[in-house]
Image: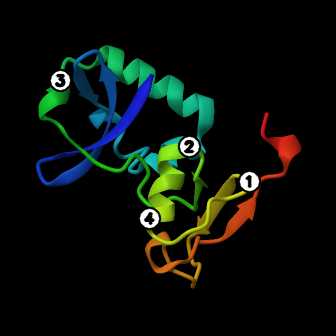
Amino acid sequence: MKLVRFERGGAAQLGVVDGSDVVPLEKLKDEFPTMLSLIAEGDAALAKARVCAQETDDRVPLNSARLLAPVERPGKFLAIGMNFRKHAEEGAALGFEKPKQQFVNRRANGDRDRRSIGDRGLMRAYAVPEWRRA
């Protein structure tokens, strides 16, 4: 089951992708007003979403739906940097040295350091130990 957030009538709404359609979870909007609230309830919420999607006739064509970021305000953002040759080449063009090991970048809500790769910061870069890259 693929959960999505999409815009409908000028407001964000939760939905489930069903083939080439999005099935709005309109009946659950009071119980789960946000994706984070649905995620927080775990398997029980997913079961409710599944049942709601099966019982709803309302459909929005996926190719015409305006999809939004899946999570409103993620608590943290994790990314792997320079993990393939093309990315390393792009970094070299910006003046970055080719890394000897892979980087994992983390940014949490509330971080004061808002530098990006473009101004030579790597959010908070951590080298991944060799034994963890399997």
* Residue at 52% in and 28% down: 46
Rendered view: 95 above or below 100? below
Distance from label 3 to label 4 (Cα)?
Answer: 49 Å
Distance from label 2 to label 4 (Cα)?
Answer: 15 Å
The first of marks 1 and 4 along the sequence is: 4
The amino acid at mark 4 is Ala
Distance from label 1 to label 3 (Cα)?
Answer: 49 Å
- For the residue pair 45 and 105, the one nearer the viewer reads as 105
| Mark 1 or 4, closer to the camera | 4
Residue that carries the numbered disc 1 in the rendered image? 101
Rendered view: 115 above or below 13? below
Residue that carries the numbered disc 2 in the rendered image? 84
Label ID, residue 93: 4
Q: Are marks 2 and 4 in contact (CB under 8 Å)?
A: no
Q: Quadrant of the C terminus?
A: top right
Distance from label 1 to label 4 (Cα)?
Answer: 18 Å
| Mark 3 or 4, closer to the camera | 4
Q: Quadrant of the N terminus?
A: top left
Is disc 2 surrounded by few (<14), some (14 to 19) or many (20+) residues within 10 Å? few
| Mark 3 or 2, closer to the camera | 2
Mark 1 lies on a secondary structure that is loop
| Mark 2 or 4, closer to the camera | 4
Residue that carries the numbered disc 3 in the rendered image? 58
The amino acid at mark 3 is Asp
Residue 35: percent from left, percent from top: 44, 46
The amino acid at mark 1 is Gln
Q: Are marks 1 and 3 in contact (CB under 8 Å)?
A: no
Is disc 1 surrounded by few (<14), some (14 to 19) or many (20+) residues within 10 Å? some
The first of marks 3 and 4 along the sequence is: 3
Mark 4 lies on a secondary structure that is helix
* Residue at 11% in and 48% down: 9
